[in-house]
Amino acid sequence: MAVLNKIKRALRGEVKLTTAAREALRRSRVSLQQRKERASLDEGEPLRLTQAFARMSADELSEYFRGPRKANLCLVLANSLSGARFNGDAIRFQITCGRLITIATSS
C-alpha cells in the first residue's frame, strides 16, 4: 500500500518525476546488490576466527560473547579522530565519552 501512495504522490506532482525515477533506480540497485551479497555468502571460503578465538572451545566462546565486556566504541571513534587536524579534538572526545559512560553506568 505504501508504494501505491508514493506513486499517487508522484502523479499528483508532489514529488518530481525525476526524483521518483532516481529513487526507484537507487532502490533497485540496492536490492540487486543485496541479493548478490546474500547469494555469495555460500560461496568461497568459510569465515575463520582469529587465533585467540580459534583456540577456545564452543562453551568458552559462548561464555565470552555473552559475558560483560568494556564498551570501547568511544575509543574507536576517538582513534579515528586522531587523524584530525588537531589532536585536541580526539582528546576532548575521549573525555566526553568517558564522562557519558560514567554517567550511564552509575545510573
Image (cartoon, grey):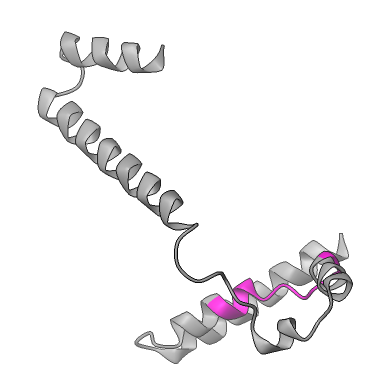
Residue in the picture at 17% in, 35% down: 22
**With 64 as the anchor, is 89 left or right in this view?**
left
> Residue 24 placed where, x, y %?
23, 31
Q: Residue 6 in magenta?
A: no
Find residue 99 and report its horizontal and vertical position in percent: 71, 73
Give whichever of 93, 58 is nearer the camera: 58
Is residue 57 rendered to the left or right of residue 44? right
Q: Quadrant of the N terminus?
A: top left
Most foreground residue, 51 or 80: 51
Image spot of residue 63 (x, y percent): 88, 70
Whether residue 68 is situated above or below residue 80 in the rendered picture? above
Residue at the spot 83% in from the left edge and 64% down from the top edge: 66
* Total marks placed: 0
Q: Quadrant of residue 52?
A: bottom right
Q: Which residue shows up at 32% across the image and 11% down it?
A: 4
22 sits to left or right of 50: left
Tell me the quarter of the picture where residue 74 sits. bottom right
Q: Which residues are magenta?
A: 66-76
The x and y percentages for residue 35 are 38, 44
Q: Residue at x 40, y 16 (%)?
A: 2
Q: Nearer the viewer, residue 58 or 85?
A: 58
Instruction: Name the image quarter holding the C terminus.
Output: bottom right
